[in-house]
Amino acid sequence: MYYRRRRQASLPTTIFIGIISLVLCVSGAIRYFREKRDYDTLMKDCTVQTDAVCIDSDSYVVTTRQRYSSYRTTWYNSKLEYIVDGKKYQYVENSKTEFPVGSVTYVTYDPDDPTKVYVGSAPTRRYDSALHNVIIGGMLLVVTSASLLSRMRNR
């Protein structure tokens, strides 16, 4: 019986993919921990709440395409104005939540630096998206490692 030998990628290609996947994994981990630290610092520093009024609102649509479908997401840039110790501050919130002009919400700010602010009860956790790079890079790293081990075993 004749078995067809499976074709393998060349050694330089395998090493190149391994290096790319390692860079992807490490850069994703660095980004994750940096953004997580910024999130935790903002949560710790911002302790005072005040009312904010939406003075301007703008929207835009982002279309995300996947294999066989696409979907649209509306994002809003809302300019909020709040007053701390008689001084007016403005903050632009970029989110999926619409704040109509004239609506009142609350912001949580740092009493030592009122320009450090977030809207609502907690800031947006944007650091979770960095884990995608870690997962994809890790999976590629496992595949290339298996390919290299298979090569070494066949020699």
Image (spheres, helix red, strand yellow):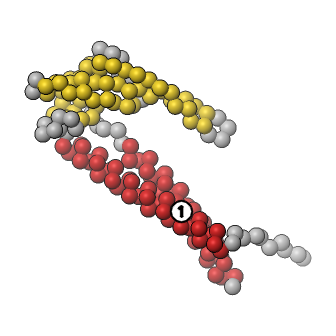
Quadrant containing the C terminus is: bottom right
Q: Residues within 10 Å of mark 1 (few under 14, many from 20)?
A: many
Horizontal placement of 47 versus 105: left or right? left
Point out residue 68 in the picture as x, y percentages from the top left corner: 67, 38
Q: Which one is in front, 9 or 128?
A: 9
Point out residue 25 in the picture as x, y percentages from the top left corner: 47, 60
Point out residue 115 in the picture as x, y percentages from the top left corner: 21, 35
Point out residue 39 in the picture as x, y percentages from the top left corner: 29, 46
Q: Please tell me whether residue 136 is drawn above or below residue 97 in the rendered image.
A: below
Farthest residue to the right: give it.
Answer: 1
What is the quadrant of residue 48 in the picture? Answer: top left
The structure residue drawn at horizontal position 37% and vertical position 31%, both measured from the top left corner, is: 94
Quadrant containing the N terminus is: bottom right
Q: Please tell me whether residue 32 is drawn above or below residue 107 in the rendered image.
A: below
Horizontal placement of 61 versus 86: left or right? right
How many numbered callouts? 1
The answer to whether residue 133 shows anywhere in this view is yes
Q: Which one is in front, 81 or 151?
A: 81
The structure residue drawn at horizontal position 28% and vertical position 24%, both measured from the top left corner, is: 80
Horizontal placement of 38 versus 46: left or right? right
The structure residue drawn at horizontal position 33% and vertical position 53%, both measured from the top left corner, is: 34
Per the image, the residue denoted by label 1 is 21
Q: Please tell me whether residue 2 is drawn above or below residue 61 in the rendered image.
A: below
Q: Which one is in front, 94 or 51?
A: 94
The structure residue drawn at horizontal position 32% and vertical position 50%, both measured from the top left corner, is: 36
SS class, disc 1: helix
Tag 1: amino acid: Ser
